[in-house]
Amino acid sequence: MDNVFTLGISSLWDEVCHMPVGGVWWLNVDRYADAVSLFNQTLAAQAKNSHVAALVMGNKPKDIISLDHTHGPDNIALFTLPNRPQALEEIHRDLVCSLEPGNYLFILLCAENAWQNINNEKLCAWVEKTSRWAQYHRCAFLASIPRRISIGS
């Protein structure tokens, strides 16, 4: 059975905050501190037996994650990404080499300037590639971007 993960914002409709496997979600967040807060809130909202991976760009996940023992999954796979565009291009291969991605929720916390020098065409290609990857591997991928980035024209 495929998992449905939650964004962890109780005031949103289920259609907006539920993330079934096979999908990609992109959230622009105005400030980095708010992106970190949303990252932790989403982690905390997952079931104890959920398969979750925390991907943190430019920082160590243990420095970012702040969960108490009563919330969130029992185990979280932790990944650190360097703050460079190549890390985003290689992320799919790196994840498959590290774990079996089926029924996982991957939560990516990008660095503040991660997408700054990536043109719109490459950005759209990355999102499309990530979508195909998530569908193929039956996982969910949430990218939290701490600044305004538009996808598409």
Image (cartoon, rainbow, N blue to C red):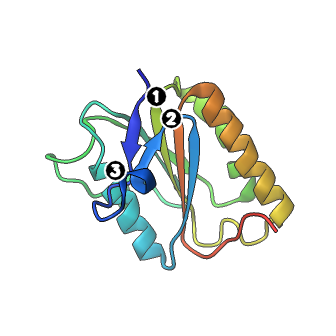
| Left or right of residue 38, residue 118 in this image | right
The Cα–Cα distance between marks 2 and 3, rounded to whole angstroms, is: 16 Å
Q: Where is residue 92 in the image (x, y as percent from the top left)?
A: 66, 37
Q: Residue at x 35, y 67 (%)?
A: 37
Disc 2 packing (10 Å; few <14; some 14–19; many ≥20):
many
Numbered circle sitting on residue 21: 2
Q: Residue tagged by mark 1?
A: 103
Q: For the residue labelled by badge 2, is the local secondary structure a helix, a strand or a loop?
A: loop
Label 3 sits on residue: 43
Compared to residue 135, the image places residue 107 above or below, namely: below
Judge from the rendering whether residue 100 lies leftward or rightward of residue 8; answer left or right. Answer: right
**Residue located 48% across and 79% down the image:** 31
Amino acid under disc 3: Leu
Q: What residue type is labelled 2?
A: Val
Dot 1 lies on which element?
loop
Taking the image as shown, residue 36 lies to the left or right of residue 91, namely left
Q: Which of marks 1 and 3 is nearer the N terminus?
A: 3
Marks 1 and 2, Cα distance to the nearest angstrom? 6 Å
| Marking on residue 129 | none
Tell me the SS state at disc 3: helix
- Give the number of callouts: 3
